[in-house]
Image (cartoon, helix red, strand yellow):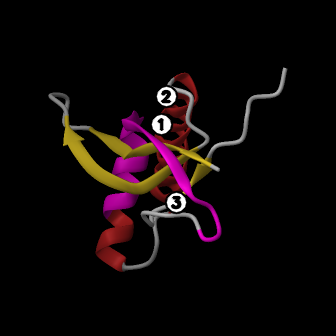
Amino acid sequence: MNKPIVLVSTTHSIEGRRIVDYKGLVGGDAILGANIFRDFFAGIRDLVGGRSGSYEKVLRKAKQEAIDDMIEQAREVGANAVVGVDLDYETIQVQDGGSMLMVSASGTAVVLE
């Protein structure tokens, strides 16, 4: 069975669609480990300049997982859209000297006409 489509927008409305019901705040979180080798090579990349492809890949994955969790929560409350979406990013240092990446997505679940 196909899951219903849920529109996601950082704006507070969807052009051409009217919000007919507010279902409340929904959110999703993803915490991913960035292994020690990535941490080491990203540190070197920071010293010499340039982009860290491994961190970018992990960041994209974490962002998508957080958004997917938020969408699933919206479906559970009967919404067909999430508006006013905000993404927050944090790096969490862990005891072994490594780090974890946390991404949070939140917004207002709504029903569009």
Helix, strand or loop under label 3? loop
User: In screen coordinates, is 24 left or right of 14?
Assistant: left
| Cα–Cα span, label 1 and label 2 | 5 Å
Graded by Cα atoms within 10 Å as few (under 14), some (14 to 19) or many (20 or more), the crowding at tag 1 reads many
Q: Is residue 71 above or below residue 20?
A: above
Q: Are marks 1 and 2 in contact (CB under 8 Å)?
A: yes
Kind of residue at badge 3: Ser
Question: Which quarter of the figure has residue 80?
Answer: top right
Residue to which mark 3 is pinned:
9
From which residue to which does the magenta span run?
Answer: 15-43
> Dot 1: what SS?
helix
Q: Position of residue 85 (x, y in %)?
A: 41, 55
Which residue was labeled with disc 2? 73
Q: Residue 93 in the image: state x and y as whole percent.
A: 18, 39
Question: Relative to 96, is 88 above or below?
Answer: below
Q: In the rendered structure, which amino acid carries the disc numbered 2?
A: Gln
Q: Earlier in the sequence, mark 1 or mark 3?
A: 3
Left or right, 77 with respect to 32, comes to right
Farthest residue to the right: give it. 1
Residue 70 covered by magenta stretch: no
Q: Is there a contact, CB below 8 Å, between mark 1 and mark 3?
A: no
Mark toward the start of the polypeptide (3 vs 2): 3
- Label 2: few (<14), some or many (≥20) within 10 Å? some
Question: On the rendered image, what quadrant is the N terminus found in?
Answer: top right
Q: Residue at x 71, y 41 (%)?
A: 5
Residue occupying the point 55% across, 37% down: 71
Would you name the residue on which mark 1 appears?
Answer: 70
Q: What residue is drawn where x is 37% and y is 79%?
A: 49
